[in-house]
Amino acid sequence: MASIVTSTRPHSNADRLEVALIAENEGSAAYQVVVPIDTYPVGQSVLHVRPDAIIPQSPNWSYLKTKMVEVEGVQMHQIGQTPVRDEMSQGIVLPFSLLPEGMSTQEWSDSLGVLKWQKPEAFDQAGERKSFPPELRKTDETNVQSVKFRAHMKAQLPKMRWCVTKKLDGTSATYAIFPDGSFRWFSRNMEMTGIEDTTYFPFVEEMTVILEQLSKMCPGGVAVQGEIVGPGINKNRGNYPKRSFRPFNIWSITHRKYFSQHLALPALCEIQTDSIYPVPNADLTMWQYDYEFDWESFDGKMDWFLERSKEFSTFNNERTEGLVWSWSINSPMGIFTEGSFKVINPNYQD
């Protein structure tokens, strides 16, 4: 991503490093990146490789000490957010001179084979799997530090009703009853129906009952999406004491929209079980999901978002990746979610 250095400050624990704020333009959200001192002055154009990118090995960045992942037999760098001498660094910065003349950053990225990293799916039994169906939507939140997203959101501010929930670190799961009455379940990318694995299958019986109840309120097909967390899932970074399914969305197959969380999460609370219960909200009052905030100066609130994600980084001793903000139209007709974004805690390590 073509970006500029908007500010720098000394590193708190390294004389030869400094902390730079990198943004797509002067008014956009900034990422914090640790860089060599006096290398990237304020106002200089740079190439910023954001967290969750996978980039090939190259002599131009042979110095990188990142986690390596294998993609189709090739070892590639996985870019994340990592503390560098106690200062969090979100991605990496490269000299703008690496961009070939006349080539856009997207064309350059495509020519290199840059990919987006996705969490490995946590199934543990082989079997035939089908692709994720088009009637449903995959769970993937836009990062609040996306410039285009923020520009779109600002126009909607006066009409919004907000809900803030925790972002849990597990593996995505979807359970659904389709219009033909069939019950099916899915990982983030694949169908798992009929596979008796130890990740998704243990929740099938209870989710069948829950979805049958929800389908009475939402005829025409309904899906519940959430995160499976607990021991053995993504190294259990959240310190969850047992495996559970933590739903956060209800999807109407007929309308092809998510129900407003002000409707969805209380409904899920009414039918929760010992192993299936909704994600908590940010204020830790559990099921009071309305959130009020002064949005008039939204462009200046980015630091507030990040600080908020750090402030509520634990719940019942469970660590969380950050917060998810969603909004619906603030009127009796606002029964569907209009959009959402995630705020990753900059101190959270993958």
Image (cartoon, rainbow, N blue to C red):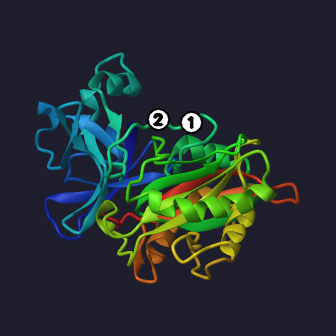
Residue located 71% across and 40% down the image:
180
Spot occupied by residue 288 in the image (x, y as percentages of width and height): 69, 77
Secondary element at image label 2: loop
Spot occupied by residue 259 in the image (x, y as percentages of width and height): 72, 55
Spot occupied by residue 333 in the image (x, y as percentages of width and height): 87, 55
Contact between labelled residues 2 and 1, with CB atoms less than 8 Å apart: yes
Q: Looking at this view, is 178 or 264 the one in front?
A: 178
- Packing grade of label 2 (10 A; few <14, some 14-19, many >=20) is few
Query: Can I make out residue 33 in this image?
Result: yes
| Quarter location, residue 346 | bottom left
Residue located 18% across and 58% down the image:
17
Residue located 57% across and 81% down the image:
284
**Residue 14 versus residue 89 in the image, above or below:** below
Q: Amino acid at mark 1?
A: Pro
Which residue appears farthest toward the top when viewing the image?
Answer: 102
Q: Looking at this view, is 8 or 125 the one in front?
A: 125
Secondary element at image label 1: loop
Residue located 59% across and 42% down the image:
137
CA–CA distance in space, label 1 to label 2:
8 Å
Q: Amino acid at mark 2?
A: Lys
In the picture, which quadrant includes the C terminus? bottom left
Spot occupied by residue 257 in the image (x, y as percentages of width and height): 71, 46
Query: Can I make out residue 344 in this image?
Result: no
Residue on which disc 2 sits: 130
**Residue 214 versus residue 64 in the image, above or below:** below
Residue on which disc 1 sits: 133
| Quarter location, residue 247 | bottom right
